[in-house]
Image (cartoon, helix red, strand yellow):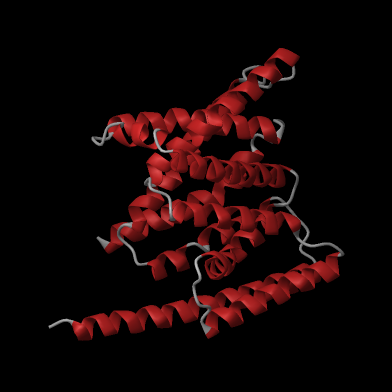
């Protein structure tokens, strides 16, 4: 069971890490148009997957009858669309390395959001990790003359999205389906408007781009389904370690394949963030091990 969980979890993060290759193949398409297609085709895929499940559509009727659920998912859909839009634009504008920084610091942003909104207490190891990461961000800000706004935007929007979904009443697939349903009309309206203006790419840019735009739904849903399957079988500590696979792949792609410049200043800033993550992971692993031993000792 755990081996399957590792395969599912690692597979999800590997697919997320390789996403820059997919979006870069669509570099000739404007980011907003890619985003709109991602929403439209993701809805098609998720509706098909929900239809194949035995649970039926009762959850959707209940969600549509509950104003609080609609408001919560409207906000999470907005955050998700902003996150997707920034990420797609950044990849095709040559900022893959900086997007990877955003996902590296995301776990520490989650810790801060937990303290601010869920009244969670900051443990000493977590506090040290957050302080070191903030030091890295400040160092990059001073050295580069401006905050790494792409990384911060990616981390904060995804962190807030995760915070909302943590308290949301729907599961992974149902939640994504509802979010894309709420985003569908604006996305479709934008695509129709682009077509009316005569500047729409789909389906005028060739077979390869057309198929890639349609496939955006599948590449959105596939890692989420793998993640959901892995999360049910793995501990949070294991998932916390696996999550570094995606930004590591993105960082490697940015430096090697896409040839993005990695100056000494940027490397030092990244090293500080990596040190913070090492502290955070070590603290979480030790704490998880103690909790597991305490549970085992308490069993009769």
Where residue 208 appears, x then y in whole percent?
59, 26
Q: Nearer the viewer, residue 156 or 225?
A: 156
- Residue lying at the far right in this picture: please name it: 145
| Horizontal arrangement in the rendering, residue 57 relative to residue 36 (left or right) | left
Asked where in the image residue 230 lies, by quadrant, the reply is: bottom left
| Horizontal arrangement in the rendering, residue 294 relative to residue 247 (left or right) | left
| Horizontal arrangement in the rendering, residue 15 relative to residue 195 (left or right) | left
On-image quarter of the N terminus: bottom left
| Horizontal arrangement in the rendering, residue 252 relative to residue 264 (left or right) | left
Q: Nearer the viewer, residue 281 or 131?
A: 131
Asked where in the image residue 2 lies, by quadrant, the reply is: bottom left
Q: Residue at x 22, y 82 (%)?
A: 296
Q: Is residue 60 above or below residue 236?
A: above
Whether residue 3 is visible to the viewer of this picture, yes or no, is: yes
Where residue 176 appears, x then y in whole percent?
45, 40
Q: Residue at x 33, y 37 (%)?
A: 59
Where residue 282 appears, x then y in whole percent?
48, 80
Q: Residue at x 60, y 59 (%)?
A: 103
Q: Nearer the viewer, residue 272 or 292?
A: 292
Q: Looking at the image, how many numbered discs can be counted on the residues? A: 0
Asked where in the image residue 69 lies, by quadrant, the reply is: top left
Where residue 66 appears, x then y in whole percent?
41, 38
Q: Is residue 130 above or below residue 77?
A: below
Q: Residue at x 61, y 27 (%)?
A: 186
Whether residue 97 is visible to the viewer of this picture, yes or no, is: no
């Amino acid at each position: 069971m755990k081996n399957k969980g590792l395969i599912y979890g690692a597979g999800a993060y590997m697919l997320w890490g390789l996403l820059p290759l997919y979006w870069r193949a669509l570099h000739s398409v404007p980011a907003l148009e890619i985003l709109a297609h991602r929403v439209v085709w993701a809805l098609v895929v998720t509706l098909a997957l929900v239809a194949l499940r035995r649970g039926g559509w009762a959850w959707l009727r209940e969600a549509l009858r509950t104003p609080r659920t609609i408001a919560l998912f409207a906000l999470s859909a907005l955050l998700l669309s902003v996150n997707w839009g920034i990420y797609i634009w950044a990849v095709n504008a040559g900022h893959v390395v900086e997007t990877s920084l955003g996902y590296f610091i995301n776990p520490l942003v989650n810790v801060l959001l937990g303290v601010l909104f869920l009244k969670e207490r900051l443990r000493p190891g977590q506090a040290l990790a957050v302080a070191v990461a903030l030091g890295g961000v400040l160092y990059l800000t001073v050295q580069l003359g401006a905050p790494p706004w792409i990384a911060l935007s990616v981390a904060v929007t995804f962190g807030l999205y995760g915070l909302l979904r943590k308290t949301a009443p729907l599961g992974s697939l149902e939640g994504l389906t509802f979010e894309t349903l709420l985003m569908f009309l604006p996305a479709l309206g934008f695509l129709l408007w682009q077509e009316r203006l005569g500047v729409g790419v789909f389906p005028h840019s060739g077979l390869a781009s057309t198929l890639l735009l349609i496939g955006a739904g599948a590449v959105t849903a596939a890692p989420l389904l793998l993640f959901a399957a892995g999360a049910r079988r793995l501990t949070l500590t294991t998932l916390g370690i696996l999550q570094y696979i995606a930004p590591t792949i993105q960082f490697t792609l940015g430096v090697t394949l896409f040839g993005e410049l990695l100056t000494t200043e940027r490397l030092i800033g990244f090293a500080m963030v990596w040190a913070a993550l090492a502290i955070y992971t070590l603290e979480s692993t030790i704490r998880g091990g103690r909790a597991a031993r305490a549970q085992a000792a308490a069993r009769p």
